[in-house]
Amino acid sequence: MTHRGSILLVDDEEKILKALGRALRDAGHLVVETASPRQAQRLLGERTFDVLLVDNMMPELSGLDLIREFVASTPEGERPQILMMTAHATVESALEAMKLGALDYLQKPFEIDELLVVVRRALEHQRLRTDYRYLVNERDEQFDHYGIVGRSRAMEEVIKRAELVAETKSTVLITGETGTGKELVARAIHDRSAQRDMPLIKVNCAAIPETLLESELFGHVRGAFTGATTTKKGKFALADGGSIFLDEIGTMSPTLQSKLLRVLQEREVEPLGSERTEKIDVRVIAATNRDLRQMVADGKFQEDLFYRLNVIPIEIPPLRERRDDIPALVEHFVKKHAQRTGRRFDKMDDSVLAGLQQYDWPGNVRELENTIERAVVLSPGPVITARAVSVLGGPAQQPAGLPSLKLRQNIEWVERETIRRALENAGGVKKDAAELMGISQRALSYYLAKYRLES
Ligand SMILES: Nc1ncnc2c1ncn2[C@@H]1O[C@H](COP(=O)(O)OP(=O)(O)OP(=O)(O)O)[C@@H](O)[C@H]1O
Ligand SMILES: [Mg+2]
């Protein structure tokens, strides 16, 4: 198996630097080269690499000192694998480097093949470490209420209820505006229940045309209707022994509401075209962003069904009513997306966090997550700035949520990403990137300057 990785290569001798860089690139790795150890230190602070390959004898700063300083300032889990290159006379330093945590060393002069083998091993080590860290992270998340972040009293209440109801088989009705985490809570309930090894089947009642929803839910036999060429199991049958998540229940038609009510009362389903009913043992979790009580009052939702569903209500308040949750959510999403992009973020401007806490978040947690993901992509360095946060609209912190401003920033984001990716695909060759996008080189130069993509 070949592992390709990102490598920071540091050697003050330009000729060696170029030759090694080329060899590693030919082997498929992404290489950043620098002849300056100081520059290397900056790079290490700005982004993550899988391997740091560093020469020892350099006038500005020795490889050993570079490693020493780096190791002292960076926790082990965030370091690349370190490899040192050394001349025969300084093998001592290489051993010293290994005591500090370097994985291996190469004694100059060495063959390219030897280099490639050592690098490949380092990448394998790094891969194992990342996988391990990922697992540990996942485990932590599970203890952390299955990924539900929430410090506010309101969310603590939601989590407590979810935990309690998980132990029962009661029907749950989760309500809340869009993006408040209804699906997340539904999953958490299922994953904590005694039925967690059985399936959780999701049905989005709004996404399936009314005519199909019935057979989707209850199944049908062959010949039940035109086009029913085979017998099909319904979602209720598939969820047997587990849970069914009925999302957007408020959009269900009156006819289907009656049929669902019967299923919940009788605990059995009748597939379309079949004369036989099937017993089912399924926990029902329903969710909606509508006000079902009001719909009942307006005659749009069956009262009996409402009470059947509303056995254990869980109401998730909108984010603007639990602003205490925002800092923890921001931290959670920065970590999540920084990890995915392989970059490091140390902090966020205080003014940015304050702005995020003041904004009203009509799209709730989903909008917050999207905003943070974008900010992580847009921020060049380890600090997330207001400029990168769309809802704040730049450093002056204009009033949040001006639609035109937001739209413009969305467009700019798309533009910038398109160009960045085209450049990446073209291996940094501008002429090819321009061609990929079907724009002139002159236009490309303009965008590169506009988005400061020029290296
Ligand atoms: N408390 C939370 N902690 C961590 N992530 C959250 C939290 N709440 C929501 N999210 C995340 O926000 C996103 C939206 O959540 P989810 O899909 O559960 O919302 P929803 O209420 O079902 O929205 P909709 O009504 O639009 O379907 C998901 O990516 C989810 O993981
Ligand atoms: Mg949802």
Image (spheres, rainbow, N blue to C red):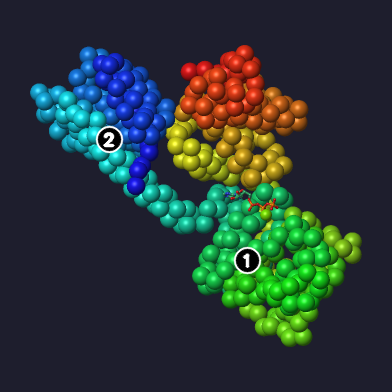
Q: Residue furthest right?
A: 298
Q: Residue under label 2, please give it.
A: 116
Q: What residue is shown at x 81% (from left), y 63% (from top)?
A: 210
Q: Nearer the viewer, residue 360 or 345?
A: 345
Q: Label 2 amino acid?
A: Leu
Between disc 1 and disc 2, whose residue precedes?
Answer: 2
Name the mark nearer the viewer: 1 or 2: 2
Q: What residue is shown at x 78% (from left), y 79% (from top)?
A: 273
Q: Residue under label 1, please give it.
A: 201
**Quick one: label 2, few (<14), some, or many (20+) residues within 10 Å?**
some
Residue 404, image quadrant: top right
Q: Nearer the viewer, residue 434 or 395?
A: 434
Which secondary structure, mark 2? helix
Say whether marks 1 and 2 touch (CB < 8 Å).
Answer: no
Q: Is residue 184 above or below residue 323?
A: below
Q: Position of residue 419 (x, y in %)?
A: 59, 26
- Measure how far apart labels 1 and 2 are at the Cα level: 48 Å
Q: What residue is shown at x 14% (from left), y 33% (from top)?
A: 95
Q: Position of residue 41 (x, y in %)?
A: 34, 23
